[in-house]
Image (cartoon, rainbow, N blue to C red):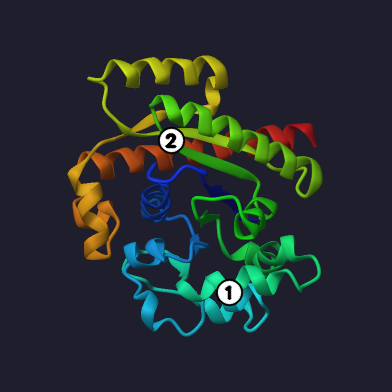
Amino acid sequence: MAKILTITNQKGGVGKTTTCVNLAASLAATKKRVLLVDLDPQGNASMGSGVDKHTLENTVYEVLTDKVKIHEAILKDTPAGYDIIGSNGDLTAAEVELLQIPRREFRLKMALMEVDDEYDYVLIDNPPSLNLLTVNALASSAGVIIPMQCEYYALEGISALIGTIEKINKRLNPNLKIEGILRTMFDPRMSLTKDVSTHLVEYFGDKVYRTVIPRNVRLAEAPSHGLPALLYDKNSRGAVAYLALAGELIRRTKLEEKETSQEA
């Protein structure tokens, strides 16, 4: 059974897509079967995975609106090393069309059920807003990874996101939880960074990943080459950090599975 994780933050520019692409590549490098779902009409996760969004025949838009089955939209053997369902500007039309479809909040969930046994992890990249696409992602997922910068306004934004997650949990997906808080663009030389980081750990405890993602030029350069940082420069600080995050995620998953089996 795949572990489905939404990577989201209603605040833009926090490293959401960077995290989705690089975590997918790092998990794939550990021999995990990974599917990345690009649910952002900008298609940045697709382009950053070496997929030309302009030439896609079938995208997540066609899947959500029942124009094709999910297997027809999955791109295998991508340069990034994991499978992907791509996205482009066509997805902007999906929200309007979804309004006319029954159980519109569960379109992605129903599609992913068809490939549940084919992957270890499904990572969903989202637009930086709360809309019907994001609701579909949250309704499909077991957990939410929240990338955030350690700055004042980020603290305000995360409280709004937590409120959204709680509402989805009560109304659409009782299994949804916060998987982890990821500190991105981390600069330990800044006192504000350290202060906000301390507050996060005090409030969220072990929900905060021990791994931090540093500010790193290679992470910023890699998307323009259509590659995750691990394939662009595997020795870069950014690539090493995302490998560490993948290891931390895998260890958490194994611990959860062990606890679940003991309860059963």
The residue depicted at 73 percent of the width and 62 percent of the height is 106
Name the mark on residue 104: none
The residue depicted at 72 percent of the width and 45 percent of the height is 168
Cα gap from disc 2 to disc 1, whole angstroms: 29 Å
Amino acid of disc 1: Ala
The residue depicted at 23 percent of the width and 62 percent of the height is 224
Name the mark on residue 148: 2
Occupied quadrant, residue 262: top right
Q: Position of residue 93 (x, y in %)?
A: 58, 74
User: Pointer 2 and pointer 1: residues touching (CB < 8 Å)?
Assistant: no
Name the one closer to the observer, 11 or 238: 11
Point out the tag, 2 or 1, that comes first from the N-terminus: 1
Q: Is residue 204 above or below residue 79?
A: above
Q: Position of residue 69 (x, y in %)?
A: 64, 80
Q: Is residue 174 left or right of residue 233?
A: right
Q: Is residue 134 above or below residue 69?
A: above
Which element carries disc 2, helix, strand or loop? strand
Q: Position of residue 39 (x, y in %)?
A: 52, 62
Amino acid of disc 2: Met
The residue depicted at 61 percent of the width and 43 percent of the height is 143
Name the one closer to the observer, 244 or 104: 104
Viewport quadrant of the C terminus: top right
Q: Position of residue 147 (x, y in %)?
A: 45, 39
Which element carries disc 1, helix, strand or loop? helix
Residue 209 visible, this orientation: no
Q: Is residue 23 left or right of residue 123?
A: left
Occupied quadrant, residue 149: top left
Q: Residues within 10 Å of mark 1 (few under 14, many from 20)?
A: few
Name the mark on residue 93: 1
Q: Residues within 10 Å of mark 2 (few under 14, many from 20)?
A: many
Residue 144 visible, this orientation: yes
Name the one closer to the observer, 5 or 125: 125
